[in-house]
Image: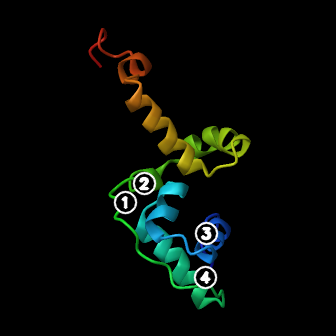
Amino acid sequence: MTRRDDSLDAPVSGLATQAVPASEIARRLGVTTQRVHSVLHYLRRHGAAFPPVRLGKRCGPQGAQLTRLNADVRAALEPHAIARGMETKALAVRILDVVIRDNLIDAILDDRETGQ
């Protein structure tokens, strides 16, 4: 059986080799801790060797909804993520962080006047 997405293998493996905690790996890559452990389990099952990964602090639900980015959104974000040397989901998280931090939701959606 072929995996649908192996794009996290290299970054997860690289960070795990450096003994970075799973919650930090998840935060950096914009995915859930569960996803990190799933990738690690798969890699170990297929012969990869790296030190046990500590759980670290709980990272919360961040990334949970972002794992469901549709193909069009991923395709639109991908060149911007590549240009910044980051994962597509991590860019999506960063964009959301900036939108919230700078209170840009109303400016971006512009839906108050139309009532949508």
Considering the numbered disc 2 on the image, is that residue within a helix, a strand or a loop? loop
Q: How is the image coloured?
A: rainbow
Amino acid bearing label 2: Gly
Badge 4 is on which residue?
43
Badge 1 is on which residue?
59
Query: Vertical placement of 77 versus 39: above or below?
Result: above
Query: Vertical placement of 8 versus 16: above or below?
Result: above
Badge 3 is on which residue?
15
Determine contact: label 3, label 4, CB under 8 Å: no
Query: Vertical placement of 68 versus 76: above or below?
Result: below
Q: Is 31 on the left or on the right of 111, as rendered?
A: right
C-alpha distance separating marks 1 and 4: 22 Å
Q: For this rendering, which residue is in front, 55 or 65?
A: 55
C-alpha distance separating marks 3 and 4: 13 Å
Considering the numbered disc 1 on the image, is that residue within a helix, a strand or a loop? loop
Amino acid bearing label 3: Leu
Amino acid bearing label 4: Leu
- Of labels 3 and 4, earlier in sequence is 3
Q: Nearer the viewer, mark 1 or mark 2?
A: 1
Badge 2 is on which residue?
63
Q: For this rendering, which residue is in front, 85 or 1?
A: 85
Determine contact: label 1, label 2, CB under 8 Å: yes
Amino acid bearing label 1: Cys
Find residue 77 and report its horizontal and vertical position in percent: 61, 40
C-alpha distance separating marks 1 and 2: 9 Å
